Amino acid sequence: MVTARSVVPASRAVLGGFIAGAVLAGAGCGGKRDDAGSGRAPAPHSPAATTETGAAPGAPEGEPAPAPPPEFPRETRSLELVRTASVRLEPGDDAKRIGTIAVDTRVGWTRTAPGKGCQRSWVELRPRGWICADFVRPSPRPPLGRELPPLDRGEVVPGTYGKVTAPGSVSYTLERPEPKDPKDPKKKKRAEPKGPITSPRQVDATIPAPAPPPASAEPRLVEGKPLVGSVTVRQYDEVTMAGRRFWRVSQKDPEYVLAQAITLHRPSGYTGTRLGDDTGWTLPIAFVWSRWGGPAHAMYNAQGQGGVNPTPIPARTPIQLLETAADKDGKPIAYRIGEQQWLAAPDVRVFQPVPPPPLLEPGERWIDVDLEDQILVAYEGELPVYATMISSGGRETPTETGEYRMWLKESEADMNGLNGEDPYSVATVPWTQFFSSEKGLALHAAYWHDQFGTRRSHGCINLAPRDARWLYFWSDPQVPPGWTMAAGVVEAPGSIVRVRTKDEPNPPPKGYAKKVVEARQQNAPVR
């Protein structure tokens, strides 16, 4: 059971700086934290001030100062978020933002400290970071958070998605007519007759006219903006109006698209493979990729004599290479993948490892992307732990090589591109990991295609949904339950993402990855 503790401030500098990029633009630069107990003179007439010996002013010498009251009740086991709130690297709203926690999440905590921008204290969280106590309430229940985005049992992605394919499509906005006030000041009253009534017409004039039929209070959909370019939407609800079905495509706004204008996406069920202790597999690792397209057939020997095995091996199947047969020049011609099972070299994509990046810490998690073969391998130090096939940038929008670091991870992110003649908009892309703030590059799930192994993206690294989810929760910075966002900073950097080619096997560091290298070269502590 976690009990409340008194304020235990630590005198240390708040490490400042900006987190680049659209989502975190505006994060404040750092400054010194105004710590209590730092040796400075207490404020005059301050009842909480203590002398250098720790005794309260006016107290007998040698008597300790009274302990401050606890920040939370003794029975507090967790702190529940009353609103979505930012997590800071240090106690203060001018410290770097390293995450966001969703409302209703219950978090564990260790201590409190004063800091800028919070009426109450700042609270140090488990596993990391600080949050303003203004945004939490004590709870007697244990810490609890849910994986975000949430997945129902059997789901591959956290929702239903589709692409707007009907030409000339538009969005619609829900309009609800306001009911008219029965006491309308503009409504004219019938004049009362003056003097005695002398004709039937005067009697008719005093009888109120029949009320007009009430205006329809039924909501209706009105046309909004045109949908230009490649537009992918998510279904939050479905309604039927005037005999037509519509998708609600915004969680916050009443925005709709005609259902018959949308072609439903069917997310890929493809997944890579675990390596290392979980499977016993290690490098070299390869994937089936038939030169003719489709599945491949294993041969009974390296020369292909004796026919082929009639059982097809599906494309993108991960395989271990047990033996290599080469020609007289040393060029591979076939690989043995089992007993009397050989695959011709042109039917295989082989991951070719190169030395890891310099200054890598022992066991540090990092990702290696081979653009030629469209293969990604995740490492812990020098140990490969996961491998899969990806889709990098296409011919017109190639993925830029470089040694990057994860700087921002979002549970879901909208993606838009308006450059050139190919504008696109993709709704709520799950498990998004940005690794280049300058170029907007990310590893993310692609629920709209199943062509992993081919180059076709706008520059990002497309992953099958199951691969994207695994890598999202494996890589650094870690995303605890209930966190909707996590950010890497120089002091606590995200995982390296090395994007390379055969011509550039060891590209230079870019972005804040370069700053991490400089800090490590100077033997400066970065964690």
Image: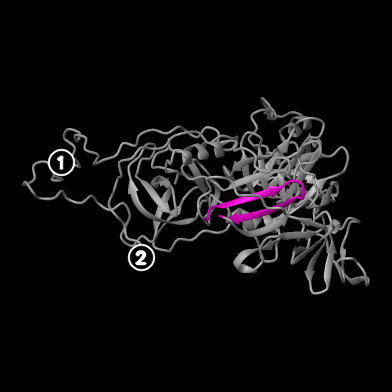
Q: Earlier along the polypeptide chain: callout 2 or callout 1?
A: 2
Say which mark, if any, is on residue 52: 1
Stretch in magenta: 363-381
Residue 512 counted in the magenta span: no
The amino acid marked with disc number 2 is Met
Q: Position of residue 151 (x, y in %)?
A: 65, 60
Q: Residue at x 70, y 41 (%)?
A: 176
Front position in the image: 148 or 461: 461
Dividing the picture into quadrants, the one containing residue 40 is: top left
What secondary structure is the stretch in magenta mostly built from? strand
Q: Residue at x 66, y 25 (%)?
A: 195
Helix, strand or loop at label 1? It is loop
Front position in the image: 257 or 131: 131
Front position in the image: 500 or 491: 500
Q: Position of residue 138 (x, y in %)?
A: 38, 56
Front position in the image: 503 or 317: 503
**Mark 2 highlights which residue?**
1
